[in-house]
Amino acid sequence: MNIGICLDKSDFLYDIHSLVKSFFPDDDVSIYTDGDAEKCSTARDLLLCVNIPDYTDRKSAKDQLKRELYESLSELTGRTLPWGTLSGIRPTKIPMKMLEEGMSRGDIRDSIRETYLASDAKISLATDVAVNERRILENVPTGPDTYSLYLHVPFCPSICLYCTFSASPADAWQRYMDEYVDAVILEMERREMLGVLPDPSKEPVVCSARGRSPVTFYMGGGTPTALSPEQLDRLLTAAETYYDLGECLERTVEAGRPDSITEEKLEVLKKHRITRISVNPQTMNQKTLDLIGRRHTVEDTVRAFSLARRAGFDNINMDIILGLPGEELCDVENTLRQIESLGPDSLTVHSLAVKRASRLTKTLREEHMAGKIGDYSRYEGLSFHNSEAIIGAAYDAAYRMGMQPYYLYRQKNMKGGLENTGFAKRGCECLYNILIMEELQEIHAFGAGASTKVLSSGGRIDRIVNPKDVRTYLDRVAARR
Ligand code: SF4
């Protein structure tokens, strides 16, 4: 459907567009002001005209306008949205602020329900997350003088169809992996290189990390365990050489893909006192794994998890994705049953974003047209289904495993207007996830596509992003040798 929104003023453009898009995630939504009368009048399936009232209090006016628009759209579509008029990526900020002001849970619920029309279930979830986050952060150093260290490994055993992380296939990059490890090590050695890599014409940003220990250490990807045991060892040894990791409150390696995890690599991680790892199945249904190009089996996940337990890891996270192609509630229930029998210490529940789902459908169609897919029939008519019942089943499983929600974020155009939530047993939460989400400290990040965040004294956050393309990254580092 082609939807137009016509505004009489240019205020609240983004908020109005986001709200309409939440009701019509699969449709094209264009927004115009009165000045674009000609474009507005172009034939559309639906044209919404919104009058912005004069106001003195911008926030109240915006909230009021969004509520009125929400009621109209709800009547038009016969639907309500779990998060009401809230479209931001961190809805937990609202209950967090209210808790800090000393409001009771009851008052928080009434206020959010009245202002944003969110469901009681989502308000309760967001408030639980805020309460847990406050508890977890109580004794964690935060602020401009603190930072966490992040290393990025962009390689993966194969590229999942829905991937948006610009991962590089390990097979094709095998002969460059040593060079990559060297480059990340060199970046760590010369911390002043930060800011030089993205744009050689810019003055380098000198991070004042020397003499300070990172609060947390996180190696992510991609799939860090796509590296060989020797490469992992070199990278971790260098991190310990250039940074004092002794004071770190946690050391995470997002191992990720089960097919890349071996006993030898786990031994290397243990040797470097990694405290938390991820073994990410995404689904425990083989038909889905085959469809999304994960190229590993359900048994690989079980094997990798058992290996990690035997190696002594007592804090293992598992990631799942809801809304994968062709998966219905019964498929998700199967995944959850198998995960519960493994018993991880934390579970991160992701909802597939609509954009990713539609890009996936488009990519498949294009590949089929180009003759790259032999058997296209298995992709035809696939649906991407997520709902409150499906996400509710995942949350129930997390609660049954003794976990609590502790971080939550939303992405634009999430299927069913839902969210991504991290659950963990007490003491097994990932501090790094909270710190990066809430932007409570600097992140010093190395590797292709790694994003360093530097807090300025005025509280502003400057981002310095390394080139995503591995070759460009390697060339930039080589040019600085
Ligand atoms: S494992 Fe993650 S990073 Fe790697 S290809 Fe799949 S989605 Fe992308």
Image (cartoon, helix red, strand yellow):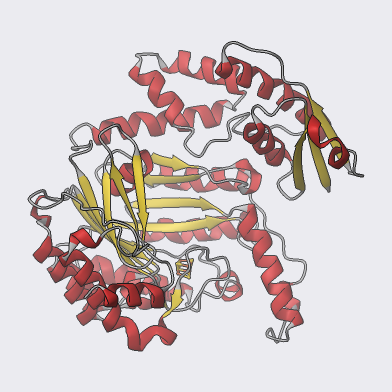
Residue 407 vertical placement versus 355 (above, below): above
Using the image, determine if residue 310 lies above or below residue 93: below
Q: Is residue 175 left or right of residue 75?
A: left
Where 290 sits versus 136, above or below?
below
Q: Is residue 174 left or right of residue 44?
A: left
Q: Quadrant of residue 50?
A: top right
User: Could you tell me how many numbered marks the image carries?
Assistant: 0
What residue is drawn where x is 34% and y is 41%?
461
Taking depth in this image into account, of 40 and 214 the one nearest to the observer is 40
Residue drawn at (39%, 72%) of the image: 258
Q: Is residue 151 left or right of residue 160?
A: left
Check the picture and name the quadrant holding the C terminus: bottom left
Q: Position of residue 412 (x, y in %)?
A: 58, 45
Residue appearing at x 49%, y 33% in the figure = 91
Task: Residue at the far top: name it.
Answer: 56
x, y percent for residue 480: 25, 72
Residue at left offset 34%, top offset 72%: 304
The x and y percentages for residue 302 are 39, 70
**Residue 91 relative to residue 455: left or right:** right
The extreme right residue here reads 43
Q: Is residue 82 visible?
A: yes
Query: Is 89 located above or below residue 95 in the figure?
Result: below
